[in-house]
Image (spheres, helix red, strand yellow):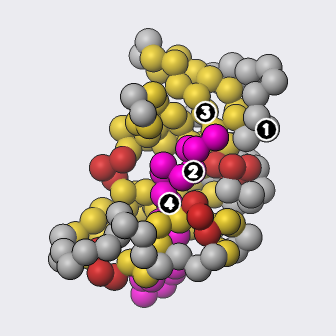
Amino acid sequence: MTKSTTGISSEDIEFSTFYVGGALCGIDILNIQEINKHFEITRVPQASDYIEGILNLRGRIVTIIDLGKKLGLSPVNKDKDNRNIIVNSEDEHIGLLVDSISDVALAKRENIEPAPSNIGGVKGKFFQGVLKTEKQLIGILDIDEVLKE
């Protein structure tokens, strides 16, 4: 486990789960500012291929990242189920464009297992760990690692 999931705490963690490129992923809800629908995104010339563009969210400029491309999965299919998960990184708002939102999962820290080096074609460095539920496997994203350039 990484340092953020180690410890002997029985504290419950809530994860907002979502689908991207066919993979079920989760982010600690404490890292999420808001989740909203796809807005009008302005393309940014010469930006990295995973950057969809920017949008104006109530006066704040938010960079939108296609999370599928960033994780090495298929790009997000643009449709009515898409959502932007807005996170705060180093005092900047970043939007993670995902295929669709799923449920909130509740877990104890000790139930999060270390991430394997490769999860369904995704580089394991982007994950803090894996949460097994009765029906599925949820890859817990390491937001800081995902947002590194």
Label 2: state its secondary structure.
Answer: helix
Q: Position of residue 122 (x, y in %)?
A: 69, 66
Q: Position of residue 91 (x, y in %)?
A: 39, 28
Q: Residue at x 27, y 65 (%)?
A: 13
Q: Are marks 4 and 2 in contact (CB under 8 Å)?
A: yes
Q: Residue at x 42, y 33 (%)?
A: 90
Label 4: state its secondary structure.
Answer: strand
Up the image or down, 6 lies above or below 59; here it is below
Residue with the most extreme front position? 3
Q: Position of residue 35 (x, y in %)?
A: 43, 41
Q: Residue at x 47, y 66 (%)?
A: 128
- Judging by the rendered image, the residue that carries numbered circle 2 is 146
In whole angstroms, how far apart are the C-alphas of marks 1 and 3? 11 Å
Lower position in the chain sequence, tag 4 or tag 2:
4
Lower position in the chain sequence, tag 4 or tag 1:
1
For the N terminus, the image quarter is: bottom left
Q: Which residues are magenta?
A: 131-149
Label 1: state its secondary structure.
Answer: loop
What label does residue 49 carry, if any? Answer: 1
- Judging by the rendered image, the residue that carries numbered circle 4 is 141
What label does residue 64 carry, if any? Answer: 3
Q: Nearer the viewer, residue 133 or 149?
A: 149
In whole angstroms, how far apart are the C-alphas of marks 3 and 4? 17 Å
Asked if residue 138 shows in the view, the reply is no
In whole angstroms, how far apart are the C-alphas of marks 2 and 3? 13 Å
For the C terminus, the image quarter is: top right
Q: Nearer the viewer, residue 82 or 41?
A: 41
Q: Residue at x 34, y 52 (%)?
A: 29
Callout 2: few (<14), some (14-19), or many (20+) C-alpha neighbours within 10 Å?
A: some
